Image: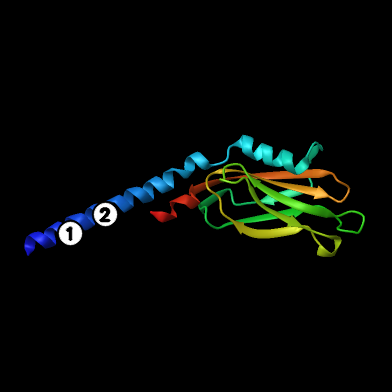
Amino acid sequence: MKKIVHHRRRRWLKQVQGLGLLAIATCLTPLKAFAKKEDADEAIKKIIGGAPIKDGKVTLTIPPLVENGNLVVLKVSVDSPMTANDYVKTIHVIAEANPSPNIFTVYLTPRSGTANVTTRVRLADSQRVWAIAQMSNGSFWRGSAETLVTLSACTEMV
């Protein structure tokens, strides 16, 4: 009887060990899937087409040091009067090192009142995050911020 229990326990321990290795492999494998700066640049080109993009008007606020990449507070504000003739149409947020660089897009109208957005996002790694605003006149403006993520969103499995 002792031998059977001992054998089952060993088999169970090997299975648990295998699951641990699977969890580590799952966590390390996405490193290959992270977007590169070129992917973020391509996403920005798709947004703006061939239009020029200017620096300014857009302020992106993100903590410079983030302990956990799962819930990172991100604020975007665009300097605009938000009138019927001059308003922000869209705000796109792009992350250079996330598996998919396009984090989100917000659509605004003059009735929005202000061009301010606050939300929480997941960041896979330390990176630069971009905010691109398209104005009602068709112009594009951008702002960016860098953050250092000490615990990537991927490592929560461990």
Label 2 sits on residue: 15
Q: Quadrant of residue 126?
A: top right
Q: Earlier in the sequence, mark 2 or mark 1?
A: 1
Q: Quadrant of residue 99?
A: top right
Question: Which is more toward the observer, 33 or 94?
Answer: 33
Query: Element at badge 1?
Result: helix
| Disc marking residue 9 | 1
Residue 150 visible, this angle: yes
**Residue 37 position in % (x across, y down):** 61, 36
Question: Which is more toward the observer, 146 or 22?
Answer: 22
49 lies left or right of 99: right
Give the residue at x 89% y 53%: 86
114 lies left or right of 118: right
67 lies left or right of 56: left
66 lies left or right of 1: right
| Disc marking residue 114 | none
**Residue 109 position in % (x across, y down):** 83, 60
**Residue 153 position in % (x across, y down):** 49, 52
Which amino acid, mark 2? Gln
Question: Which is more toward the observer, 34 or 144?
Answer: 34
Question: Which is more toward the observer, 134 or 25?
Answer: 25
Give the residue at x 74% y 58%: 116
The quadrant of the image that shows the C terminus is bottom left
**Spatial separation of the CA atoms under disc 2 and disc 1:** 10 Å
**Residue 120 position in % (x across, y down):** 61, 59
Could you classify mark 1 by the number of other residues whose Cα lies within 10 Å: few (under 14), some (14-19), or many (20 or more)?
few
The quadrant of the image that shows the N terminus is bottom left
Give the residue at x 59% y 52%: 63
Residue 55 visible, this angle: no
